[in-house]
Image (cartoon, helix red, strand yellow):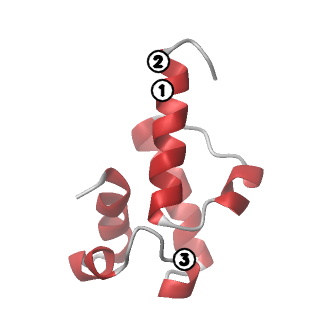
Amino acid sequence: MSTIRELLVELTGTVEYADRIGDDTDLAASGIDSGDLVRLVLLVEQRLGVEITAEDMEELRTIGDYERFVAERTAARASGGV
């Protein structure tokens, strides 16, 4: 299970939620509310050390979006970038 899915399980309290949605499913359309999306961002920042701005949040709609974003920021940080 991906890190983002693990964080979603923590937020929703159910493995079934994270298992039933695809990587490209819009999280808001899948039933997660805006408060949980904010909590997801906070968890990503705290646990993974990746800063997410309000502008970034507008682009992060799916699990795949979050995973790509985290991978890009982590790689940039490792290479001395962002």
Q: Are marks 1 and 2 in contact (CB under 8 Å)?
A: yes
Q: Nearer the viewer, residue 79 or 8?
A: 79
Element class at badge 2: helix
Q: Residue at x 64, y 23 (%)?
A: 82
Q: Which residue is mark 1?
A: 75
Q: CA distance from mark 3 to mark 2?
A: 29 Å
Element class at badge 1: helix
Q: Quadrant of residue 22?
A: bottom left
Q: Are marks 3 and 2 in contact (CB under 8 Å)?
A: no
- Residue 45 in sight in this render: no
Q: Residue at x 53, y 21 (%)?
A: 77
Q: Is residue 5 left or right of residue 51?
A: left
Along the polypeptide, which appears first: circle 3 or circle 1?
A: 3
Q: CA distance from mark 3 to mark 1?
A: 25 Å
The amino acid marked with disc number 1 is: Ala
Q: Residue at x 58, y 73 (%)?
A: 35
- Residue 4 in sight in this render: yes
Q: Is residue 24 left or right of residue 3?
A: right
For label 3, the crowd category at 10 Å Cα-Cα, with few meaning under 14, some 14 to 19 and many 20 or more, is some
For label 2, the crowd category at 10 Å Cα-Cα, with few meaning under 14, some 14 to 19 and many 20 or more, is few
Q: Which residue is mark 3?
A: 26
Outermost right residue? 55
The amino acid marked with disc number 2 is: Ala
